[in-house]
Amino acid sequence: MSISSSKTIDWLLEEADPGVRYLALRDLLHRPGNDAELLRAKRDAHQFGPIAEVLNEMDEQGFWVKPGPGYGPKYKSTVWAILLLAQLGADIHADERIRTACDYLVEHAWHEQGQFAAGELVSYTIDCLQGNLCWALTALGYEDTRLDKAFEWMARTVTGEGISPKEDKKAAMRYYAYKCGPTFRCGANYGEPCSWGAAKVMLAFSRLPVDKRTPLIEDAIRQGIGFLFSVDLVTAAWPSGTGKPSRDWWLFGFPVFYVTDLLQVAEALTGLGCGDDPRMQGLLALIRSKQDAEGRWLMEYPYGSKTWENYGIKNKPNKWVTLRAMRVLKER
């Protein structure tokens, strides 16, 4: 079935699901920002949809569950709530609580050289967290010079420019036990380049406006694209400390936190303008092959009650996953 199927789009536009409806109007039908129907859908998504439900769980200071950097507990604390809000299409200009949350996160998780960290110490910086938060804050519409520094640090971690080895503990800027080397090397992947982290970093760069892409960031983007295309995408055969790819690569889901699927790799690469690259064709075919007879995609990796709200039942047609897939296929 064609991805342009009006039946599938009509399903996504159902009034009963204001969050999906808003994003389908914005991203699939490309309604202009001043379109009355889009504006009404955006308002409904923020007032009555899952965005409102997540925001209603926020402490008035700007955190979820407990104060601090917000990495734990998974998947309801501040880091995960902000990632979830960004994936739901929340807009900082639509609800002042979103700005409060972004300010709180940056105040408590950001470090002076640009790192976001999972704990109080800067050494808890890691690619998946850095990429996730750079993407989410940008998607939410947050602007701050500290976010600019976060993108610069992230680019340096890819290229290695200006960063000393982790053993050089007197260096002003160095790698650490988790973020341990260039080209996505990660202690959590036994020092090998981490493709989950790479997908997050490249997704964040894809969201960064072109006029903010410095030569350093452009170099990091080129290296990151080269890394992702270093294997046949559908094999997910990037370096792995376990010796084999995670089965989760082939399970499409919503939301997406640090566990990564091949659909997110496609989101990052199409967002960077690689949708027509011949090396994408196998992955795009894989995504199409997952459509059911109604032109819908299944929820293969749900979080259920682990995060705020529930976004679908495992192995059932799912609007959020369908929206993700259709965005990718329309980008090429």
Image (cartoon, rainbow, N blue to C red):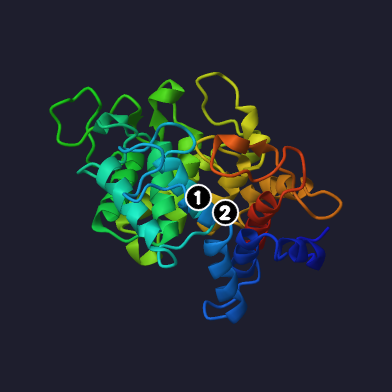
Q: Position of residue 118 (x, y in %)?
A: 34, 33
**For this view, does 56 lie left or right of residue 30?**
left
Residue drawn at x 52%, y 56% as measured from the top left? 51
Using a 10 Å C-alpha cutoff, classify the residue at mark 1 as few (fewer than 14 neighbours), some (14 to 19) or many (20 or more).
many
Residue behind mark 1: 54
Residue drawn at x 81%, y 64% as measured from the top left? 7
> Looking at the picture, does residue 202 appear above or below residue 332?
above
Q: Position of residue 89 (x, y in %)?
A: 52, 59
The C terminus sits in image quarter: bottom right
Q: Residue furthest left?
A: 170
Q: Quadrant of residue 224?
A: top left
**For this view, does 92 lie left or right of residue 89?**
left
* Amino acid under disc 2: Pro
> Looking at the picture, does residue 182 appear above or below residue 211?
above
Q: Are marks 2 and 1 in contact (CB under 8 Å)?
A: yes
Q: Taking the image as drawn, is residue 303 in sight?
A: no
Residue drawn at x 39%, y 35% as measured from the top left? 71
Q: Taking the image as drawn, is residue 15 in sight?
A: yes
> Looking at the picture, does residue 252 appear above or below residue 60?
above
